[in-house]
Image (tube, helix red, strand yellow):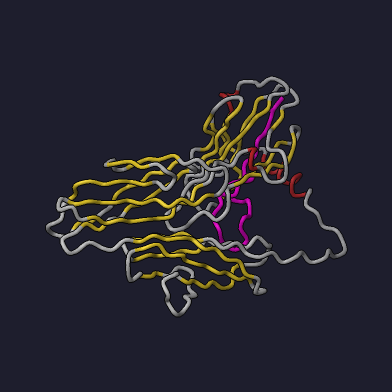
Amino acid sequence: MNYRLRWLAPLLFILSACGGGGGGSSPAAENRAPTANFAFTCADLVCTFTSNSTDQDVGDAIASQSWTFGDGTATAVTVPAPSHTFAAAGAYDVTLVVADRSGVSGSLVRRVTVTAPATPAAPHANFAVACSSLDCTFTDSTTYDAGSAFQSRLWDFGDGTTLASTNPATHSYTATTLTTFTAKLTITDMAGKTSTNVQSVIVAPPATSLNCVGGNCVLNLTQPARVSAGLVSHSCSAQGNRVVMTAPVTQVIFPDGCVDPVGTVVSINGGAVFAANTQLQIAVVSGTLATARLAFTPAIRLTGDFANGWILTFDDGYGGPGEPDFNDLVILIKATP
């Protein structure tokens, strides 16, 4: 049952009143080094790299980046998303060094393996990947020169699992935090010529009570009550952020909180009364965005109580200035005795 969010304003006033103001000044926080991270896509010898580095200090940001590609290239590249063509097949240690506004730096080295392109009349392997939390779909978009035709494909998902032929292919990863896998598609044509495409796949588990920021994310009903969930606001970097009740009942509350209408209220468990001392658990499955990469592990946090309702805020893990800001989804959970 969906209806409008009529009881929102009083609760938001209560929550906003909790914010602090206080006199005096506090000592400046220590400036922490930024975290370097990057993803890449390689078609044979040609690679594109994308920095998804982050700085966890409030108000700070990545101010510069420097790339070296491990192949003897004399000059470092300083753009955030460079392309690079390697001269020969092999494994190369690509290094990214990032610095914040104060000059404090962090670095990451990642090994990238490239293959030599096939001769003319050959395939040119390519694929797209879309993930919802740990579940990913891989779609082959290989092109073929005139005189070249498909014979076989092999997926390597980067976690020890391979799969032949299927297109599109689905795969579920296992990870307890933000994890980068390197997936590879190898195409062989009728003449036996091969082409490979490798890409970074960044996945993270759903945001649940296990990665709740600031304490407990389990909602305890101190009295018998009906429960509803209202979508207060959304400001998503991605689409597909799915809100799910996982205990004591399983229910999709918002199929995509990024596009569901603000103000929508959903009754939990069909409006049936839950017994006193029932513990409610909610998970948010982070969606995807084709042009961006996860930078943080998606997380939730919870404020409020049984009497006034709980505000659940969610950050979907995409980077940028001011992230994580926990405003991607704001949801009000209200218990009515």
- Across and down, in percent, residue 100 comes to 63, 70
Q: Which residues are magenta?
A: 313-337
* 122 or 25: nearer the viewer: 122
Query: Of residues 105 and 258, which is closer to you in this image?
Result: 105
| Residue at image location 15% in from the left, 55% down from the top | 148
Give the residue at the far right of this rendering.
Answer: 24
Residue 66 pos. (x, y %): 52, 73
Q: Find residue 92 and report its image quarter.
A: bottom left
Residue 149, position as x, y percentages in the image: 16, 52
Quadrant location of the C terminus? top right
> Where is residue 87, by image quadrant?
bottom left
Residue 61 vs residue 164: left or right?
right
Q: Is residue 319 magenta?
A: yes
- Asked if residue 201 is among those painted magenta in the image, a careful observer would answer no
State the image coordinates of residue 212 (x, y, percent, origin top left).
66, 42
In the displayed structure, 245 sits above or below 111; it is above
Front residue of 141 and 331:
141
Q: How many marks?
A: 0
In the shown orientation, is residue 117 left or right of residue 319?
Answer: left
Residue displayed at 53% across by 29% down: 251
Note whether 11 is above or below 94 in the view shown. Answer: above
Left or right: residue 18 compared with residue 189: right
Of the pair 135 and 233, the residue shown nearer to us: 135
Residue 142 falls in image quadrant: bottom left
Q: Quadrant of the N terminus?
A: top right
Extreme residue in the left direction: 147
